[in-house]
Image: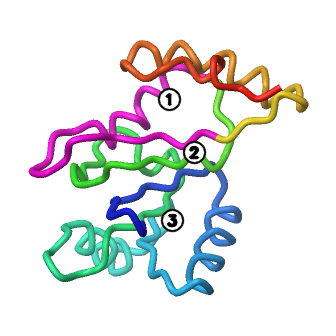
């Protein structure tokens, strides 16, 4: 966010989402939290914060993957943090699509993908989703591994 980015942090579990939101609040951020099971009033208030305004804080959205599936629209988002492993290429394409939508002033999109080649399940899920990156025009993340 210190670089002027509108960020989307995705995880799969509500408990992890709450931990991330709490940690970000402790560091002075005020994330928009989106997850299943929100009441109508909380959901309406959260969604109302998704329209960036000049002079207002940058967007920081923390959501569960299922919540921002089909139908979610916030074209100002330009940076995706995958905070939980995913394997399915189609899911990666869907999630990355949230930051690839055109928006005035947006020139780049970034995906921050965390993986560990020493952990079997994480290495395997990276190998499965990597073709999704190349199909979207991103570099193949397997070419940038340290090791």
Q: CA distance from mark 1 to mark 2?
A: 9 Å
Q: Which residue is pictured at 21% across the width and 49% down the height?
A: 75
Residue 108 within the segment the image draws in magenta: yes
Q: Position of residue 23 (x, y in %)?
A: 65, 77
Q: Position of residue 29 (x, y in %)?
A: 48, 81
Range shown magenta = 88-113
Marked residue nearer the N-terminal end (1 or 2): 2
| Quadrant of image for the C terminus | top right
Q: Which residue is pictured at 53% across the width and 53% down the height?
A: 64
Q: Circle 3 sits on which residue?
A: 37
**Of the pair 83 and 143, the residue shown nearer to us:** 143
Q: Position of residue 107 (x, y in %)?
A: 21, 42
Q: Which mark is residue 82?
A: 2
Q: Circle 1 sits on which residue?
A: 92
Q: Give the structural element (helix, strand or loop) at label 1.
A: helix
130 vs 32: above or below: above
Q: Give the structural element (helix, strand or loop) at label 3.
A: loop
Marked residue nearer the N-terminal end (3 or 2): 3
């Amino acid at each position: 966010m210190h670089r002027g980015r509108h960020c989307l942090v995705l995880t799969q579990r509500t408990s992890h989402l709450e931990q991330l939101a709490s940690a970000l609040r402790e560091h002075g951020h005020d994330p928009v939290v989106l997850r299943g099971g929100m009441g109508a009033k909380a959901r309406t208030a959260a969604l109302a914060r998704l329209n960036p305004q000049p002079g207002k804080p940058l967007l920081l959205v923390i959501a569960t993957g299922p919540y921002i599936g089909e139908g979610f629209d916030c074209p100002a988002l330009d940076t995706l943090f995958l905070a939980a492993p995913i394997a399915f290429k189609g899911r990666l394409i869907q999630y990355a699509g949230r930051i690839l939508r055109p928006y005035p002033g947006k020139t780049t999109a970034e995906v921050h993908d965390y993986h560990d080649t020493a952990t079997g399940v994480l290495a395997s899920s990276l190998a499965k989703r990597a073709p999704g990156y190349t199909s979207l025009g991103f570099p193949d993340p397997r070419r940038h591994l340290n090791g």
